[in-house]
Structure formats: structure tokens, C-alpha cells
Image (cartoon, helix red, strand yellow):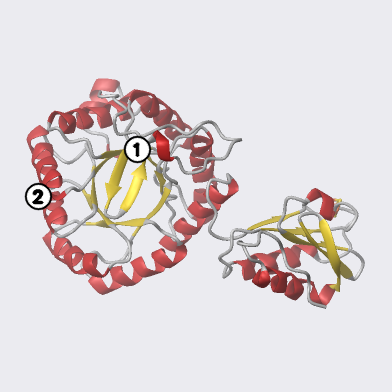
Amino acid sequence: MNRSSENVTAARQDAWPAYLSPRRLSRLVRVGALQLGGGRRPLVQSMNNADPHDWQANLKQIEQLAQAGCDLTRMTIPDPEAARCLQKVVPLSPLPIVADIHFDYRLAIAAVEAGAAKIRINPGNIGGTDRVRQVARTCKEHGVPIRVGVNSGSLSRSALEKYGGVSVEALVSSALDTVAILEACDFHDLVISLKASDPALTIACYRELARRCDYPLHIGVTEAGTARSGILRSAAALGTLLAEGIGDTLRISLTDDPVKEVEAAWDLLSALDIARKRPVLISCPTCGRTQVDLISLAQEVENRLKTVHKPLKIAVMGCIVNGPGEAKEADLGIAGGKGEFLLFARGKILGKVAESQAVDRLFELIDNWSEAEQSPPHPAE
Ligand code: SF4
């Protein structure tokens, strides 16, 4: 494995939270106009689930994903007709498209020729060395990177026999064996993923892979589940990895609308203070001091914040005794008293407002908040 850091761009690191472990320095790979790895902000990915033969449905879905903050998305290419569909989508797409290829290396070549910005191949089913070499040659000609994407459920029979079943070594070696074939073709525009449906195994695999190569890593848990459990299982694994500085692009796979995957990925990046696109809501758990209907009110604030695109931290607290102080890191907040709320900004009290008007007044402050000024406005009386 070539562990040279010649392509590692340590000089231009995007900001990384001081409380997390130092960022793993990976090579920089270009995906269309995007830069992946090399210390850049982890890119948010999703995958279309529209009919791969319906270019209009795919384009519509990509526009929705872009609106939600997706950086790049993947389309499955199961046959030549899907490659022709991809060719129609690419020029109109606001996002670079990754072509997902299984079984037939000729589809990988067709997808690259159709304009895919990156392709994903699965070493478990793409075929022998010769086929991988042909894919590499086409990708090199077009400047298209390859993701070597290993999944625990689709390891090749030879890997399963060699390693005695699914294990960290089986997954890591399966990926690195394919990487070695590509490197032998002088192909280094690589991204690697090793996904298991078990979050603990996923963490162990990526830790080992991060130790053994400097390629950018696409992190994710496969078959993570429906929205609630899928987000929790993914957050457990990807949150751990990101906190250890591992991960250059992420997908939170859900049995749900792909837009929710993007929202969840941003929520995770935001929770770790890696990047923020929308406001973060913090709210207290309520206790015997609470004299307002804080649960409903916090839910209302959360819903209204979905349309706000400012990197704010908003607090909704249950009492005026502890609320403003406990949430003093919040940019703006409200704390409940008896029939009224205090408005505050970074711990400083701005005034009082009746309970019935508290949410509206909070959103007036949010609307008037300017990132450039870095200070909240005074509340309108
Ligand atoms: S902020 Fe006040 S109401 Fe909320 S948990 Fe703390 S003490 Fe209780």
C-alpha cells in the first residue's frame, strides 16, 4: 500500500472542532467540481431511489436532495438503459452523480462515458482483475474517481473462505486487494467504504482501514433501518468515527425518503460542530420548576426552524432561574416563567414577552439576526 502523503493537503484544512480528535489526513480526490478528502468538510451523500430508467423522476429527486443540502448523490445503473438515463440527467443535475455498479464492469464504463462524476464498484461482484483494470483505464481517461465499496453482506466467496466469514480483516483486505489492483494500473483517485450493518463492526473496520491507507473514506452503516433506528445506529457509528477524525464523506442510509438521509447527516455534522447548515435547537428536559407547556413549544420551534438557514444555536428552556444561564452558549433563546417568557441572547436578558407571543418574538429575533454582525438585534417591543 502506498502510504505516501504527497497528495495530502495539510495546508488547507477546513476548521475542525478542537474537542474532537485531530482529523485523519487523507488524499484529495476531485468529484466533478467537488473536493473530497484532503481535510475538506465531510461531504454529505445520499442515493436516489427513483426508477433508474426515468430521467425526469431522478432529476426531480436530485433537485430535492440539493435543496436539503446534499453534496453528491448516487444512482444505480443496473442495465444499459439506466446508463442512457444517466446521460440525460447529468447535464441538468445540480449535483455530481455517482454511478453505482454491480456485477457488470461494462456498465461502469458506460456510466463514465455517460458523465458520472464518480463510480462505485463492489469488489465482491465486479469480476476479476482484468475487468477492474478496464474500468480503471476508462476512469483515468475521463478523470473520474472510483469508490471501492465493500459491504459485509456481499463479500466475495473467496474472501469469506480465506478469512473464515465476515470480520474486520475480511472487509479491510477485500477492499485493499482491489485497491492494489487499481494502484498497479497507476490509478490513485480512490475512495474506500467498508459498510457493515453492525455499527460496532463498522467502527472497527474503518479504524483499521484508516490506519492502513491514506485514501479518503466514505463512512456509513449499511441496512441501518427505518428513520428512528437507522439514524441512531448510524449516529453511533459515524459519530464515533467523526469524533476520532475519520470520515471524508458520509451517508446515513435509511429505509425512508432520501431527503431525510441528508437532513440526518447534517444534523450529525452539526451536533459535533463540524459544520452547520441550519439552526441547532437545544432545550431542557423540563422538571418540577417548569410552569409552561415546554414540550409543545419546543416542538413548535423545531418545526419552524426547518425553514431557517442560519447557523444559529437556539435555546428553549423551562425556567427563568436556570434557563438563560444554562443555555448561555445559545445565540438566541427563550426561558419560561409563569405565563411569560424571558428572551435572551448568549445569556444576556433582552426582555419579557407573554407566553402566547414567545415563539413569534423568538422568530422575529431569528429573522433579524445577522451572521455578519455576530450579535442579535434588540427585540421589537
Ligand atoms: S432549565 Fe429550569 S426547568 Fe429546565 S430542567 Fe433546568 S431547572 Fe428545570
The residue at the point 29 percent across, 67 percent down is 93
- Residue type (three-letter) at the residue carrying disc 2: Arg
Q: Is residue 298 visible?
A: yes
1 and 2 marks in contact (CB < 8 Å): no
Count up the numbered dots. 2
* Residue identifier under label 2: 106
Indicate yes or no: mark 1 CB to ligand 1 under 8 Å: no
Position of 209 relative to 222 (above/below): above
The three-letter amino acid code for the residue at tag 1 is: Pro
Q: Secondary structure at mark 1?
A: loop
Residue placed most toward the observer, 254 or 139? 139
> Which image quarter is the N terminus in?
top left
* Residue located at (33% from left, 72% from top): 60
Please give the residue where the numbered disc 1 appears in the rendered image.
216
- The quarter in which the C terminus is drawn is bottom right
Residue 332, percent across and down? Answer: 73, 61
Label 1 packing within 10 angstroms: few (<14), some (14-19), many (20+): many
